[in-house]
Image: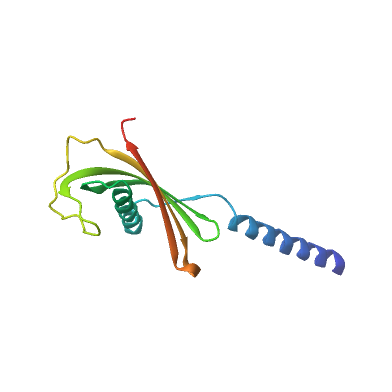
Amino acid sequence: MIWTNCIFALLILLATIVLTEANSIHGPEEEDPSLPMYHAMAVDSLNQYEEQNELSNHHVVLEVIKVTKQVVAGYLTTIDFYAARTLCKSVLYDLVPPDCPLDTVSPTLLCQSQLWSRRWLNKREITIKCSNAST
C-alpha cells in the first residue's frame, strides 16, 4: 500500500513537471492589443520603419489589432497594427506633433513588427514590414 501511494505521488509529480515544461515552451500566446505598452512598441517599430525607408513624413499608429508573445531565449512580441502617413515632415527622433493631420490621400498601412527582447543582454531587435492595407 505504501509503495502504491509512493508510485502514485511520483506519477503526479512527474506529470506536473512535464506539464510545466510544456507550458514554458509552447507557441505564441495572444495578448490584449489595447494595452498602452503595445501601442508604444508599435510606435517604436514605426519609427524604425520611417528611418529604414528614409521616409520624409511622419507616420502614426492608428490601431493595434493583434499581439502575440512567445518565450524564445527572451520574448518575441509580434504586433499587427494599422498606420497612416501624416502631413508633418519627419525629423529623426522627433515625436509626431499631436495636432499633425493625416494624409488622407496616402493609403492606410497594415504593419507587422516583431520585437525580440533579451533583457539579460539589455538588447531589443525590431523587424517591421508594412504594406497597403487594401492589398
Residue at the top extreme?
135
Image coordinates for residue 56, horizontal then vertical, percent: 21, 46
Task: Tell me the quadrant of the picture where the N terminus can be found.
Answer: bottom right
Which residue: 31% across, 46% down?
A: 53
- Residue 58 in the image, given as x and y percentages of width and height: 21, 49
Q: Is residue 109 left or right of residue 129?
A: left
In the rendered image, residue 26, in percent from the top left (x then y), is placed at 58, 52
Measured along the vertical axis of the image, is residue 56 above or below residue 12?
A: above
The answer to whether 14 is drawn above or below residue 114 in the figure is below
Q: Position of residue 61 (x, y in %)?
A: 27, 48
Counting labels gives 0
Q: Is residue 3 visible?
A: yes
The quarter of the picture where the C terminus appears is top left
Nearer to the camera, 18 or 50: 50
Query: Which residue is depicted at the point 30% across and 51% down?
Result: 51
- Coloring scheme of the render? rainbow
Could you tell whether 90 is left or right of 111 in the image? left
Q: Is residue 107 left or right of residue 1?
A: left
Q: Position of 49 compared to 58: left or right?
A: right
| Image quarter of residue 105 | top left
Viewer-closest of 34 and 71: 71
Can residue 1 be seen here? The reply is no
Q: Residue at x 43, y 57 (%)?
A: 125
- Foreground residue among 78 and 67: 78
Residue drawn at (26%, 38%) of the image: 108
